[in-house]
Amino acid sequence: GENVEQHPSTLSVQEGDSAVIKCTYSDSASNYFPWYKQELGKGPQLIIDIRSNVGEKKDQRIAVTLNKTAKHFSLHITETQPEDSAVYFCADRGNLNPNTGNQFYFGTGTSLTVIP
Amino acid sequence: GAVVSQHPSRVICKSGTSVKIECRSLDFQATTMFWYRQFPKKSLMLMATSNEGSKATYEQGVEKDKFLINHASLTLSTLTVTSAHPEDSSFYICSAIRTSGDQETQYFGPGTRLLVL
């Protein structure tokens, strides 16, 4: 089945610095790559996504890059703030099971801590 | 972004009882909803795919008679944990798929914390 790997598992940065989280995937048919932020005790919140027809997307301090040839995509957070501290999950939408439709496959998560 | 609600947000029940969790898409219709389970400091584990008007599709290892899913309308899916046991205690999260043209986006609910005593 599809395999999504996410690194690093934990990341600590000083406030104001940048944070980068990387994910790789195996299904070459994947065409949608969302990133979710999950705060303690809450559901994941979609923060940015990218589809396979573009290589980069930016939304204020958050950007995502996609390299379909290498099958990896990354989340970039600039000018980090303490409220960016959370667990971040990458995901891709595979197409391996025609009976269930396009299922989402998640990375293992990155716990980001922004130190004031 | 789109809004997905879950109710209740947390529930405590006795072993052997059943618990129903509701998932609603508030501002869009969702033909497909997913139910996930999440253990502490772990990623999301897909339990089942809920399709409006048809039976849910369960992932391998998930007991369909234990976790009953009903997707009765385009805005509501329910998960019932039957004869709950302490090992069913977990964080359950639903998501709903919003479709716009040929693009699908997944939005999550806030989660339900279940504690079985």
Image (tube, coloured by chain):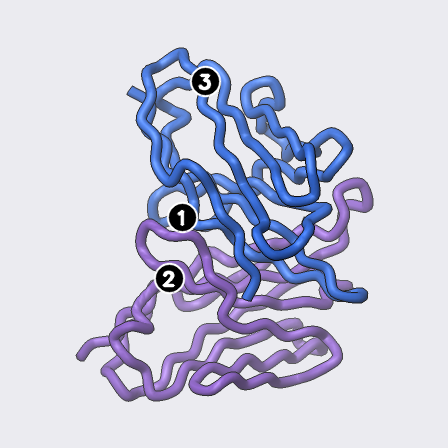
Cα distance, mark 3 to mark 2?
31 Å
Instruction: Name the kind of residue labelled 3 in the image.
Output: Ser
How many residues crowd mark 2 within 10 Å: few (<14), some (14–19), many (20+)?
many
On-image quarter of the C terminus of chain B: top left
- Residue highlighted by disc 3: B18
Mark carried by residue A87: 2
In the rendered image of the structure, the colour used to display chain A is purple
Are the residues under marks 3 and 2 on the same chain? no
Instruction: Name the kind of residue labelled 2 in the image.
Output: Val
Which numbered mark, 3 or 2, is in the foreground of this view?
Answer: 3
How many residues crowd mark 1 within 10 Å: few (<14), some (14–19), many (20+)?
few
Give the residue drawn at x 80%, y 65%.
B102
Residue positioned most to the top = B16
Which numbered mark, 1 or 2, is in the foreground of this view?
Answer: 2
Instruction: Name the kind of residue labelled 1 in the image.
Output: Lys
- Residue highlighted by disc 1: B42
Are the residues under marks 3 and 1 on the same chain? yes
| Near-viewer residue (A98 or B91) | B91
State the count of labels: 3
Above or below — where is B96 with respect to A89? above
| Near-viewer residue (B9 or A14) | B9
Cα distance, mark 3 to mark 1?
25 Å
The residue tagged with tag 2: helix, strand or loop?
strand
On-image quarter of the N terminus of chain B: bottom right
